[in-house]
């Protein structure tokens, strides 16, 4: 008698906006060999288009509206309770525009990924494309990292470079960076679901060995 296949690792995605990275993950998950299952999408904004993307893909959704809570701690507590109800193996932050409390981050240590539009550790925070142009940098990009208590400071797993062009504006640069985001995020999520990446006490393990520097896609 043939044994039933092992269940796939489960993924919960948190988003705040239009959900283009969510869509890239949904599209990737439709491949027959994708090693994970997106089981839920959560949002802190009731009208976010990310919720529509999830609904169109028949993925469960939930909304924890941050405006309904008097403090960041209360919001995070409600969000944590909802996440635990789904019990995912991986939490993917895909344009989730909330700063999470240290208690929340510690609760899901090693199983939460974030994407940031810069080559970390450069340009943490907001307005990265404008800041890159103002600094005269010739290379920009995107980073995917494990989430830790330090904002945008968790160990970086992978990066994709984008060449800065002379006529770039923040919008044109952002568009090309986003194209690389849509390529890179599904790759890293796949690695996690395959058990190839882990958060260690002092960095990232890739296939069981310390990752001395982020995996890197070439400049585009």
Image: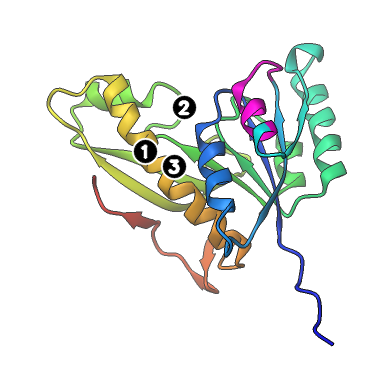
Locate the C terminus and report the quarter of the image it occupies: top left
Query: Does the magenta portion include 49?
Result: yes
The first of marks 3 and 2 along the sequence is 2
- Locate residue 152 relative to residue 129 in the image: left or right: right
Residue to which mark 1 is pinned? 179
The majority secondary structure of the magenta stretch comes to helix
**Mark in front: 2 vs 1:** 1
Q: In this rendered view, identify the residue nearer to me: 215 or 106.
A: 215
The segment highlighted magenta reads 45-55
Q: Which quadrant holds residue 23? A: top right
The x and y percentages for residue 24 are 50, 42
The earlier-in-sequence mark between 2 and 1 is 2
2 and 1 marks in contact (CB < 8 Å): no
Q: Which quadrant holds the N terminus?
A: bottom right
Return the x and y of residue 174 as percentages of the image width and height: 34, 27
Task: Identify the element where label 2 is drawn.
Answer: loop
| Label ID, residue 115 | none
Q: Mark 3 Cα within 10 Å, few/some/many (few <14, many 20+)?
A: some
* Residue 128 drawn at (x, y percent): 37, 26
SS state under label 3: helix
Q: Residue at x 84, y 28 (%)?
A: 78
Is there a contact, CB below 8 Å, between mark 1 and mark 3? Answer: yes
- The residue where tag 3 is placed is 182
Q: CA distance from mark 2 to mark 1?
A: 20 Å
Q: Which residue is mark 2?
A: 125
């Amino acid at each position: 008698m043939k044994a039933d296949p092992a269940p796939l690792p489960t993924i919960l995605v948190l988003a705040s906006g239009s959900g283009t990275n969510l869509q890239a993950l949904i599209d990737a998950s439709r491949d027959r060999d994708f090693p994970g299952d997106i089981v839920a999408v959560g949002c802190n904004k009731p009208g976010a288009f990310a919720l529509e993307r999830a609904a169109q893909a028949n993925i469960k959704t939930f909304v924890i509206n941050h405006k309904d809570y008097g403090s960041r701690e209360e919001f995070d507590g409600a969000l944590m309770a909802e996440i635990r109800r789904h019990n995912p193996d991986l939490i993917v932050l895909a344009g989730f525009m909330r700063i999470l409390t240290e208690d929340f981050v510690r609760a899901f240590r090693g199983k939460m990924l974030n994407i940031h539009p810069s080559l970390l550790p450069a340009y943490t925070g907001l307005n990265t494309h404008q800041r890159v142009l103002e600094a005269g940098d010739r290379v920009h990009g995107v980073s995917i990292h494990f989430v830790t208590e330090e904002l945008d400071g968790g160990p970086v797993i992978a990066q994709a470079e984008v060449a800065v062009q002379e006529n770039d504006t923040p919008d044109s640069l952002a568009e090309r960076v986003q194209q690389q985001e849509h390529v890179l995020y599904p790759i890293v999520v796949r690695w996690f679901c395959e058990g190839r990446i882990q958060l260690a006490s002092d960095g990232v393990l890739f296939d069981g060995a310390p990752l001395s520097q982020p995996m890197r896609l070439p400049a585009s």
